[in-house]
Structures are given as structure tokens and as C-alpha cells.
Amino acid sequence: MPSKLKKSLIYWAFLSPLVVVILFPFAVMLVTAVRPRDELFVYPPRWGFSEFRWDNFAEMWVKTNFGEALFNSLYVSVLSTVLALVLSIPAAYALSRYPFPGKGAYRTFLLMTQMMSPIVLVLGLFRLMVALGMVGNLNSLVLTYAAFNMAFTIWMLQSYFSTIPRDLEEAAWIDGASHLNSLIRIFLPLAVPAMAVTAIFSFINGWNEFVLALTMIRSSDDFTLPVQIYSQVAGRYQVEWHHVMAGTVLATVPVAIVFSWLQKYLIRGMALGAVK
Amino acid sequence: MKSLNGFKPLAMILPGLLLAMFIIGYPVLDLANTSLQEVSRFGQLRGFTGFDNFAEVFSDPLFWGSLKRTAIWTVTVVLGTLVISLPIAIILNDDFYGRGVARVIIMLPWAISLTMTAVVWRWALNGRAGLLNATLMDMGIMTEPIEWLAEAQLAFTVEMMIGILVSIPFTTTIFLGGLSSLPQDSYEASMVDGATRWDQFRYITLPLMKPFINIAIVLNVIYVFNSLPIIWVMTEGGPANGTDILVTYLYKLAFRFGQLGKASAISLIMFGVLLLFTVIYVVLVMRDEKDTAAGEDE
């Protein structure tokens, strides 16, 4: 098929500038992360370097307290995801299965909160956490991430739940199964993939969040990864760029792989629901 | 079961609803209250002063400067994103060798937090040893390294380009969803009528994609208008407030300068603007859903 080959070449030629610009920061990250420290600032600047310093990663891990930040990020992302899902699953089930008074208003409310950005409310959120005595506490992030994520998780879940045929559950009721029973034995197993995908996206949101973590967390022991890495760069005369880049590699590459693998579900979920 | 019909679903949505209303509702009310009071830099409210905080905001040249840059930032990034994303979505929707790889690469910026992206770019743009300078010098495009982030105008331009780059994946995704729903037969019919590919784009794709373009515009406006990390990490709104947009200026007022009354007033103004965009979005989605529902006879 020469015509498909020709088309492919034209397309790739068209995409190549963008592809280069997208991959450029990844190359910068990797090349800097394994560079010896004294080859960071050379004149003229160059890509090449004398040897691969894999020790940079181990050094960075100890010096920047990476392990602790990693744990904090995991803690916040996992707990906020669990909280958001526990509250979203029944809500999404109700939306996809029952008519109820105020359903339209509720859907509108979800759409609106989905658009609410924490940054506009950041001062009010900070004052809320002061009032609750939770400033500097990682749980303040768990609560806020869960609350801001819920609109998204409910939308995603209900768009998937609506694709699970109702007949299966109804058949079970006729066979004498209780409502709860049919929910647990028939609906939930079918809904597991949807919940897993939604959970992963909620996790990534928490993992990547910056503004609230920067605001609520005071002590560097409690920094999450984005704030930790930012704090290595901001307001310092001497930035250890090889450490910073080693940190960004470790913090981003695993998430990027998972995301790339799952992105088609996100596209499908959005096509089904939020952006129909 | 029938009698429970109204009550049970309400009980199912209630816990989540309460959390969202508390975490999102309380700050809104608190900001509204704070914006009308005199506030000490430690957050104590010292009594109502009417609209003094708002008056102070409106007489502040830095506010107007940030507002102007917010408009430039939002319009440039959103338009740039749309213009690049539409052809990319059309390409990715077509069948060609390596499409899977292309999709993964184009979506990649989405997977990475804006903070990390901005940190990496800050280093890549370093005026002495940045690898962008290295690349451009290797290619012979320039002979001296450039201080990309030292001068406000240049820094702001670079930040807008990075803003476009990170908005492309999401926008392309919306367009891909739209393109996959377009009816194939109208393309076939137009081929029979001898239409060129440009004609097809102009008279079939573009009009049918209009609802998706609208949604992409509104959502991107909301996201870009609210986006802090790129500018914050790369220049912190500097040099000399030259890259400040409303969110960065707001953040500085609130958490650097302790001008809480003024910061609350700006928050509320931004909340109002955001609410307006959101209402537009909700209307668009609802209208679209009504069309689909009518079409599918649900």
C-alpha cells in the first residue's frame, strides 16, 4: 500500500516539530539526571557529557529526603482517592439507576464544581484549614483533593455504570436476590474496571497537585513530591540541577507510563459522559 | 422498594454532596465575608469596611497589569492550542503507520504535573547552561546563549508557548471524541461530488465539530485562566511583576504580602469570572445533551 506509506510520511512530517518539542524536556531531564555535577555549567552549553553517573539517583534520594516526600505523596493520593471513591460510587450508582427529585440540579452542581479550581479559593481553603486546626497536616490535602476530585469521579463512574445493563440486576431480583445482594454479586464485579480506571486518574490528580500542597504544608518533612522538587529550585542561589532532574525522572516516569497505558479509557470516559 | 424510590438515591448522594458543599462552599462564604472587612496580616477580621478592599484593588496598577496579562495569556494559549490541536486530531483520527506511537507521544505532556514540566523547562531555558541554548547553538541558529527568563516579555512569551504545549493533549482528546462521532457517509457523498479535502474540512468537518470546538474553548479558558504552576515555577510572576497574571498576583498578595482583604477581593472577582465561564459551559453541555437525548429518543 504505497498510498498509506506516503500518507504516513506526510503525517509524521507534519507532527514531527510537535513531537520534538514534547520529547525535548524528557531528554533534558534524563541527560541532566545522569550527568556528573561539574559538567552542569559548562561553556558553551552542550548535550554531551563524559560518563553516566547513576549514583546521582542514590545521592539525590538521601540529600533531598526523596523517600519521605514519596511516602507523603502516596499517602495523600491514595487516601484522597479512597475517600473520593467511597463517596462517589453510591452517588454515581444513584445517578445511573434511579430518578430522584433534584437530579437535574445535582448534575448541574457537579458540572459546576468540576470547573471550580482550588486556586481561586485557595485563601478561603487555607482559612478553613486554620479554623479546623489542620494547617500543616497532610489530611487537609486528603479532604480537599477528595472534595475537588469528586465531581470528576462521579461523572466518570456514572458514565460507565450507565453502560452496565440493568437487566442483569433485575433478573437477579426476580430470582429472589435482595437488592444489596444483587448489588454486591452482580453489579460490583462488572463495575470493577470502571472503578479501577477512575481511581487511577484520581490518584494521578492528587499526585500532581501543586498549589494546595504548597499552601497547606509548612514543614519540609510533610512536603509532597511536587512541592519538594519545587523547593529545591525556588529561592536558591545554588540549585543542584542534577538532583532536581533525577527527582523529576523518578516522580514522573512511572506515572507517565501508567497514564499512557490508560489514556484510552479516559478518552472513552470523557466521550461517554463529561464532554459528550 | 417503590416508597424508597425518592429517599434512597438521595441518601446515596448526600455524603459526597455534604463534603463538596463544605469544602467548596465554606471558602466561598468566608472569602465573601473577608473581602468586606479590614483584615490584619495574620488573618484577624477587624470589622466591616464596605467595599474598601475592592476600591483598593481597582486603584492598584499591578492588578490592572495582571488582568491585562491574564487576558493575553488566556486568549493566546487557548487560540494557539485550538489551532494546533484540530489538525492533529484529524491526523490521529486517520489511519497511518505508527499512529499508536504518535498518540502516546502527543498525550504525554498530560501525564506529567505542570510543576514538574515547569521545573524541567526552567532548567532547559537556563541562560548559561540550558540545553535549549545548547541545541540552538549546535544548530548554528545563534552564537551566544540567551537569557530566556531574565526579561519579562520574552519570559512571558516562552511561558505561553509552554502553556499551549501542555494544553494540546486534552484538547486533542476532545476533538478525537468529536471526530469519531462524525457520519462517514457525508464524506463519501462529498467525494462523489468531487469535493477536495479542503472543501470537506471547510464544509463538513468544521461545522459538525462546532459543538466540540465550543466545549474545548470554554474548558480551556477555565483551565488556562486558573493555571498557576507554569508561571509560578518558572518566574514567580517576575521580573518586576512583568509576568504576573491574576492567579500569581493573588497568591503573592495572600501568602507573601499578607494583604488578605485585597486578596479576598481578587479571589471573589475571579470566582465571579469563573462562575460566568462555568455557566456558559453548563449551558453548552446541557444543550448538547438535550440534542443527543432527542436524537437517541431516550
Image: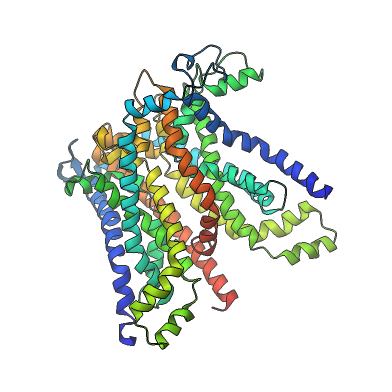
In the picture, residue B296 is in which quadrant?
bottom right
User: Measured along the vertical axis of the image, is residue A80 above or below residue A68?
Assistant: below
The answer to whether A216 appears left or right of B42 in the picture is: right
Residue A67, percent from left and from top: 33, 35
**Residue B150 makes an appearance in the image:** yes
In the picture, residue B231 is in which quadrant?
top left
User: Measured along the vertical axis of the image, is residue B103 above or below residue B186?
Assistant: above
Which residue ends up furthest to the top in the rendered image? Answer: A43
Q: Residue at x 62, y 37 (%)?
A: A19
Residue B50, percent from left and from top: 22, 47
Q: Nearer the viewer, residue A54 or A231?
A: A54
The answer to whether B219 appears left or right of B271 in the picture is: right
Q: Residue at x 43, y 56 (%)?
A: B278
Residue B213, percent from left and from top: 59, 54
The answer to whether A10 appears left or right of B285 in the picture is: right
Q: Nearer the viewer, residue B296 or A23?
A: A23
User: Measured along the vertical axis of the image, is residue A30 above or below residue A4?
Assistant: above
Colour scheme of the rendered structure: rainbow
How many numbered badges does the structure rendering display?
0
Q: Nearer the viewer, residue B159 or B180?
A: B180
**Residue B242 makes an appearance in the image:** no
Q: Residue at x 56, y 12 (%)?
A: A44
Residue A248, percent from left and from top: 43, 33
Quadrant of the frame with the C terminus of chain A: bottom right
